[in-house]
Amino acid sequence: MRLILLGPPGAGKGTQAQRLVAKHGIVQLSTGDMLRAAVAAGTPVGLRAKAIMDRGDLVPDEVVVAIIADRIGQPDAKRGFVLDGFPRTVPQAEALDRLLKQRGLALDGVIALKVDEGILLKRIETRVAEMTARGEKVRADDNPEALKKRLDAYRAQTAPLVDYYTATGQLKTIDGMAPIDAVTAAIDSLLKPAGRSRSRGKPAATRAGRARTAKAKTARGRAARRGVKKSRGKAARPAAGRGRKAAKSAQVSRKKAGRRAAKRSRAGTRSGARKTRAKRLTRGR
Ligand code: ADP
């Protein structure tokens, strides 16, 4: 499963991403966390990003795209990932499309958490208070000035992604103002129909399933054409062999049915005789 969580700072992307990780066994790829780790480790990327992040501005696209390109190729991301904080600009979204295409991968959905801006400052104040109470280091950009910048950056550069993914038909919007569990449940229900066909509610054929069926059909077909006998199971038996057996049993049932019909007509129930007479009369015979 490959998902994107979209939403302004404080929308709850991180919280929901962690729940998706626990539920689906995928990895959370948060560019914010990765950049903070790079800053803490003092890597060249970290050194470049630190001042930009502290102000609340966006790190250059090529920096985050390179991080993501590397990260989605790692073994733990094979089962899938939830992107949190990426893409954040249209060029990043375009770069992601190219990256996925090159690797033959596709997104399962883009989930936008919709929240009132008025509540975001409050949420971040609460986060700061909780982190302080736990004795954790508060993020350098969790202050009113940087937060204002982050919100401006969201409005100007990230919000256009709503249109971008609406145009691709991948956007699903969730009410991010609902309680955390309700948001999780809403995301779950959005993801469930992914495996079902919309028209009849039957399980949709998965790509792997379709491949298996096609393989089985062609294997059976080939075996039948060659007249090969296989010892394993009915499905593997050559069609020609099954045909002979089926024809014989059909012949037996036809004979039985014939004998039963003859017996009935010999016995000739009264109502049967009456019906036959009536038929003859209507036909004028
Ligand atoms: P937020 O709580 O604002 O969503 P994040 O933890 O996702 O914060 O990101 C923190 C900071 O890291 C951003 O303000 C920005 O400077 C930088 N950053 C994270 N992801 C990206 C990205 N995809 N593109 C550019 N900058 C990013």
Image (tube, grey):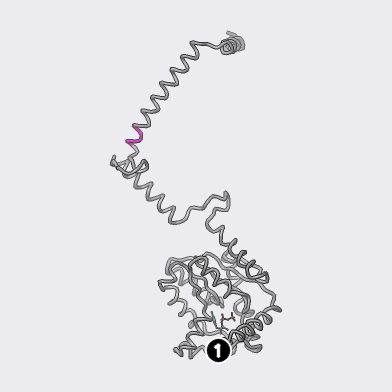
Residue in view at x 55 percent, y 12 percent: 269
Residue 75 x %, y %? 40, 71
User: Can you name the residue that lies furthest to the top here?
Assistant: 285
The reply to whether the residue tagged 1 has its Cβ within 8 angstroms of ligand 1 is: yes
49 and 188: which is toward the camera? 188
Quarter that holds the C terminus: top right
In the rendered image, residue 242 lying in the magenta stretch gets the answer yes
In the rendered image, residue 111 lying in the magenta stretch gets the answer no
129 and 83: which is toward the camera? 129
Query: Which residue range is magenta in the image?
Result: 240-244
Q: Is residue 27 visible?
A: yes
User: Can you name the residue that lies furthest to the front here?
Assistant: 134
Relative side of 155 to 218, left or right: right
Residue in view at x 63 percent, y 80 percent: 156
Relative side of 73 to 273, left or right: left
Residue in view at x 56 percent, y 13 percent: 272
Above or below, 108 against 73 in this view is above
Q: Quadrant of residue 141?
A: bottom right
**Residue topped by disc 1:** 52
Above or below, 94 against 221 in this view is below
Residue 47 x %, y %? 48, 91
Q: Is residue 159 visible?
A: no
Majority secondary structure of the magenta segment?
helix
Residue 134 x %, y %? 59, 84
Residue 200 x %, y %? 57, 49
